[in-house]
Image (cartoon, helix red, strand yellow):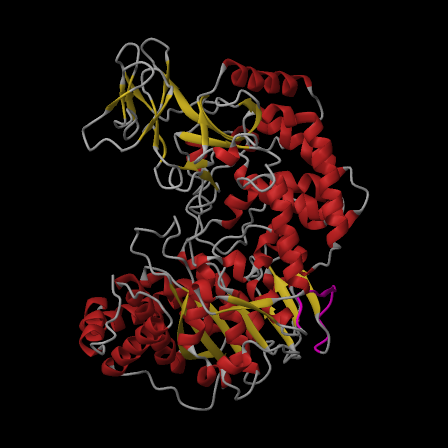
Amino acid sequence: MSLEEHFDAAFAAALALQEKQIQQSYRPVIGVHKWFARRPGTLFRNLLLAEYNGDVPLQDSYYRAHRLRGVIADPFMGGGTPVVEANRLGFGVVGADVNPMAYWIVRQELSAIDDARLVAAAEEVIETVAAGVGSLYRTTCTICGRDAAVKYYLWVKLARCPGCGEQVPLFPGYLLAEAVRHPKWVFACPSCLQLAELGERPGKGQTAPCPHCGGSVGGPGPARRGHIACTKCGHDVAYPVACASPPEHRMWAIEYHCEHCKPTHRGRFFKPPSPADQDLYEAARRRLAQTHGLPIPEQAIPAGDETTRLLRWGYRRYRDMFNDRQLLGLGTLFERICGLSDQALREALLTVFSDALRYQNMLCRYDTYALKCQDVFSVHGFPVGLVACENNLLGIPGVGSGGFSHFVEKYRRAKAYCRQPFESHGSGSKRCRLTILGEGIAAQAVDHFPNAEAREAWLSAAPATEIEIPPASLDGVFTDPPYFANVQYAELMDFCYVWLRQGLDQDHQAFAPQSTRSSQELTGNITMGRNLADFAEGLSRIYCHYASGLKDGAPFAFTYHHNELEAYAPLIVAVLDAGMDCTTVLPAPAEMGASLHINGTGSSILDSVFVCRRRVDLAIAPPSAEELRALLVNDCREMQAGGVRVSLGDVRCLANGHLTRMAINILRSDWSADRDTEARLAQASDALGSLSGGLREVVAAEAILAALVAEAPPEKPLALI
């Protein structure tokens, strides 16, 4: 059992932690298209090499080229990390996902493309579209009076006062830019809406005089907790209110780029919108109304755990999340891409278009610290902010981010990495790239079980159980399954899918459905009525199906983390139903602590990696309470050695993983998969509850951290938070 013996948790942690800080630098392949909560490619490379590269230490083999043979399967393909890493090492791969967007992303990751032809086609498309709509993204520089390119437009939502009918701007605050990447603090004046640049930010409860009107600048915004006082009559205005249309917006600031002034100008260029800027938007509105036949999706937004927030704000169709200038530009760009005759180039640029949508909508926000547009999916949901950021559609070459041209370059870098992968060695200023000659990311797409001697890929946009797996055919299963209800993949990916399917549904059956939502999606979802029992039942079916195809002794390894111990019970059901034992649980970094959906929540950044195998001959005795604490302390020490600042949330999640392994190996002797799901889930939950209760004091996160502090060498204290 190589993986259990040869996995170097500290080494893998150091690589994974660095990768998650700048994942597109370590694994540029992810630049093909956004997927949620991608696990580190470095982690799966380490797992695969630990299992299949014999007794060679990971630190010796990691930076070498490999040409391994066999077939690896991933029944929860998602963004394709295990599939891509296995393909790179030489394996044939089987990948399935019920979400057609996941299928498409992995297909594009493994497909070859000619760099020069891709760039040439993209430049032709950009030039044509710029001639049509590029003038809508221009403004006048307030310094030199010359024509300049707009980077971002800032808009504020409006709410109609039920008392007087006034459209009230919902400013949560008036800060535009912090004095970090710009020399001064920039605020909008609440009275005149002109911009004021201040050398210092006013203290709490204080303001500064507006240089334009003498009003007060730097105070808090009036919109608070769903209420605001009408600026005209003082009536209380509640927001959002149920309505049949999305909220209106008012443009209040612009960040632009002046090529003429930039060499001598410090900081960014900001201005309030002029009448000419407002007129340009109105021109775009009129053009959209007069232009017919643009490929703009008309699908309604169905209710869902994430999309209900959109409906509450009045967004009824996916097109409602874009303003008229965005719809005109996106429709024009999409139409031009669809006109390309070369299918491979057309599909590549449609993929780029789909990915760029994340930065081309009215749910994007402006980061006042980094001074850039934020991805709509930065929090793995649909945040409806009161201030929206409209990006330049095509982008300014070498300036800003989020434009179509920026995403073309990201896609090009991704495919260049696929042709010649590299690994990053060292950290900080000492980090260097080591080219791994002899490896590559590419596969021959097939519609049958892959040849173990060839790097073939059998990918399917279907439930994983519909893939026919011959007995004793898989050298391993490596996967990252859904973490119950942590991410609503289909609800989020429909945002891109409704556009992309318009260009792909004629050639690809996977894009025939109107939505990526499926009753067979394995996520907990209140709106769809999918609970923990449904999750357990679906997980069990898939684990049983793939475990039955494993060769003798082959591993079934998967990552998992959840704050609630109850969410681990379905894993117990699935593993035991599949006739497997859990031979070990390994710790590994999986998230970046600074990620917007994690930062400040107390959640863990660590996964438990469960390594399971079909019934093994050797007895696996569950650890005692003392042994369990020793395991946790050792896990934390290895993570610390890899650079992780161990938190209470981390210890709790690692404890959940070990308790789950204990429950699996305690219950295996008299487990019956013939009982109904509720009964099996209850037995698993009871075992977890009993173990957790009986070992509460021993495995308490606070106790583990205290033990770490007490046992840490004085010259190397652990960094705890």
Is the stretch drawn in magenta largely helix, strand or loop?
Answer: loop
Extreme-front residue of the structure:
264
Where is residue 32 shown, x and y percent of the image?
61, 53
Where is residue 330 shown, x and y percent of the image?
63, 32
The image quarter in which residue 443 lies: bottom right
Extreme-right residue of the structure:
341
Q: Nearer the viewer, residue 252 or 8?
A: 252
Q: Taking 686 as reference, is 69 left or right?
A: right
Where is residue 355 shown, x and y percent of the image?
59, 45
The residue sitting at 23% across, 82% down in the picture is 626
The image quarter in which residue 4 lies: bottom left
Q: Nearer the viewer, residue 605 or 391?
A: 391
The residue sitting at 33% across, 21% down in the picture is 189
- Report the span colored magenta: 439-452
The residue sitting at 68% across, 17% down in the picture is 290
Where is residue 252 shown, x and y percent of the image?
43, 22
